[in-house]
Amino acid sequence: MVSCGHFEKNVIDKISSDLVYFFGFPLDVKECSLDLSSFYNPTRRQYDANLILQAIADVSSPDALKTMGHAFGLIHCNNPRCIMRSSTYAEDLDQKDLEFCYKCKRELDEKINGYRI
């Protein structure tokens, strides 16, 4: 688990212990190396989740990005280029872009911010 932002240790400990209990395997907690200040939109007074996820995609694997999409409530997508497309075969991974399609970006934004872009 990567902690992005300033959180009290007891909050991080509680979240990590809940994840260990839920998934049943050990979990390492690391500090985020991303400077999140560049993702803050002062007009909206919030962080832009799409930009954060894109930055994470630039430094992580497709499976990690897809897992994050699931963590935010996205389901598998029918778009063959979308990172949220189900991968049955290794060849499926080669067809995907390392980003969400427009539909998934819109749904993700709605889930995080409560409205459509």
Image (spheres, helix red, strand yellow):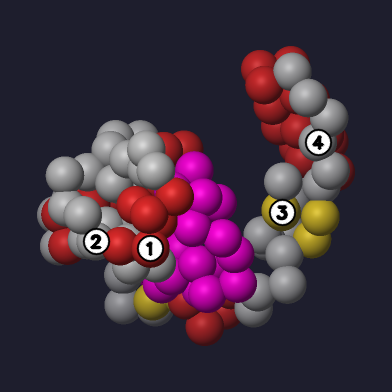
Q: Nearer the viewer, mark 1 or mark 4?
A: 1
**Mark positioned earlier in the residue sequence (1 or 2):** 2
Q: Which residue is drawn at 73% across and 72% down?
A: 33
Q: Which of marks 2 and 3 is in front?
A: 2
Locate residue 3: give its quadrant: bottom right
Whole-Å distance between the Cαs marked 2 and 3?
29 Å
Whole-Å distance between the Cαs marked 1 and 2?
9 Å
**Mark positioned earlier in the residue sequence (3 or 4):** 3
In the image, residue 57 lies in the stretch drawn in magenta:
yes
Whole-Å distance between the Cαs marked 4 and 2?
31 Å
Q: Residues within 10 Å of mark 1 (few under 14, many from 20)?
A: few
Three-letter amino acid code at the position of disc 3: Ser
Q: Residues within 10 Å of mark 4 (few under 14, many from 20)?
A: few
**Left or right of residue 113, residue 18 in this image:** right
**Helix, strand or loop under label 1:** helix
Q: Where is residue 18 in the image (x, y as percent from the top left)?
A: 71, 22
Q: Do the residues labelled 2 and 3 touch (CB within 8 Å)?
A: no
Whole-Å distance between the Cαs marked 1 and 4?
29 Å
**Mark positioned earlier in the residue sequence (1 or 4):** 4
Q: Do the residues labelled 3 and 1 touch (CB within 8 Å)?
A: no
Q: Main secondary structure of the magenta part?
A: helix
* Residue 108 visible within the image: yes
**Helix, strand or loop under label 2:** loop
Residue picked out by circle 1: 94
Q: Where is residue 59 in the image (x, y as percent from the top left)?
A: 60, 72
Q: Give the range drawn in magenta.
A: 45-68
**Helix, strand or loop under label 4:** loop
Residue picked out by circle 4: 27
**Left or right of residue 61, residue 83 in this image:** left
Residue picked out by circle 2: 81
